[in-house]
Amino acid sequence: MNTQRAAQPDGQSPVALQVNGVDWWFSVAAVTRVERDVFVQVALDGPESCMATFHVRDRVVFGITARDILTAACEWLARRGAATHAFIDLAEASAVWQPAAVA
């Protein structure tokens, strides 16, 4: 997964992702809190426009939660088939990969 900051003329800075050789623009569309849970809806614009909603349970950890969302988005894009919408529970998705070791 390659990630990089990319400037847009409208002043926003979405993240550019490259998944299986395809470029995608990742940007946060909405964030909603429901009691202790957070739902983050992101737009993924590439060859198609896709939307994914991520369910973050209990709390957001600075630096970690964003990385987990980016990783889950790339995993979904890599295996999505023809789907253009997804609901991803980060608690379930995190069992798919192990976080990188922190030195």
Image (cartoon, rainbow, N blue to C red):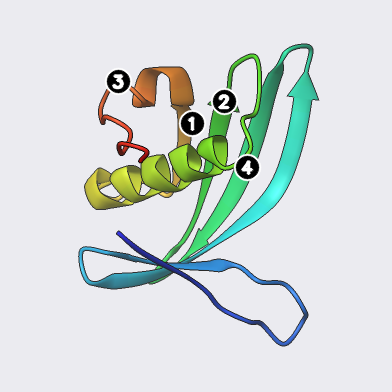
User: Element under label 4?
Assistant: strand
Residue at mark 4 to residue at mark 1: CA–CA distance: 9 Å
Q: Which residue is mark 1?
A: 87
Q: Position of residue 11 (x, y in %)?
A: 77, 79
- Of circles 2 and 3, which is in front? 3
Q: Position of residue 5 (x, y in %)?
A: 54, 73
Is 28 left, or right, of 83 in this rendering?
right
Q: Which residue is mark 3?
A: 95
Residue at mark 1 to residue at mark 3: CA–CA distance: 16 Å
User: Element under label 2?
Assistant: strand
Give the mark, 2 or 1, whose residue is nearer the N terminus: 2
Give the mark, 2 or 4, whose residue is nearer the N terminus: 4
Above or below 98: residue 45:
below
Give the mark, 4 or 1, whose residue is nearer the N terminus: 4
View extreme (bottom): residue: 9
Residue at mark 2 to residue at mark 4: CA–CA distance: 9 Å
Q: Which residue is mark 2?
A: 55
Q: Amino acid at mark 4?
A: Gln
Give the mark, 4 or 3, whose residue is nearer the N terminus: 4
